[in-house]
Image (spheres, rainbow, N blue to C red):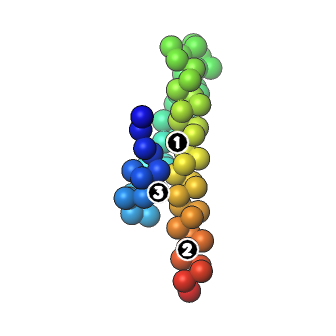
Amino acid sequence: MKKKGTELKDLTVQELQDKLQEERNSLTKLRFNHTVSPVESPVMLRVKRKDVARILTELRMRELVNTKTK
């Protein structure tokens, strides 16, 4: 079982933003490929979408922590 949350907490904000861009691009390509011809595993769409959400959540939590400390 993967632990995505702890993996993301170890990254810097810049690394998270880069990873977010990479995941979004990957999701877009996967969606396009799925539209043209069905992908082998449609579950991958859900997994990618949840990965994007996890990254966004981590970025938002860090943003809220930074505003509280200021």
Label 2–label 1 contact, CB within 8 A: no
Q: Is residue 14 left or right of residue 65?
A: left
Q: How many marks?
A: 3
Circle 1 residues within 10 Å: few <14, some 14–19, many ≥20: some
Q: Is residue 45 left or right of residue 13?
A: right
Judge by depth and name the residue closer to the eye, 57 or 15.
57
Mark 2 falls on what kind of element?
helix
Counting from the top left corner in percent of width and height, residue 51 is at 52, 42
Mark 3 falls on what kind of element?
helix
CA separation, marks 2 and 1? Answer: 21 Å
Give the residue type that dot 3 points to: Gln
Mark 1 falls on what kind of element?
helix
Counting from the top left corner in percent of width and height, residue 15 is at 39, 57
Give the residue type that dot 2 points to: Val
Judge by depth and name the residue closer to the eye, 69 or 48.
69
Give the mark nearer the N terminus: 3 vs 2: 3
Q: Is residue 59 above or below residue 64?
A: above
Counting from the top left corner in percent of width and height, residue 12 is at 39, 63
Q: Is residue 63 above or below residue 55?
A: below
The label shown at residue 29 is: none
Give the mark nearer the N terminus: 3 vs 1: 3
Camera-side mark, 2 or 1: 2
CA separation, marks 3 and 2? Answer: 17 Å
Q: Name the residue under label 1.
A: 51
In what quadrant of the picture does the C terminus appear? bottom right
Camera-side mark, 3 or 1: 1
Label 3–label 1 contact, CB within 8 A: no
Circle 3 residues within 10 Å: few <14, some 14–19, many ≥20: some
Give the mark nearer the N terminus: 2 vs 1: 1
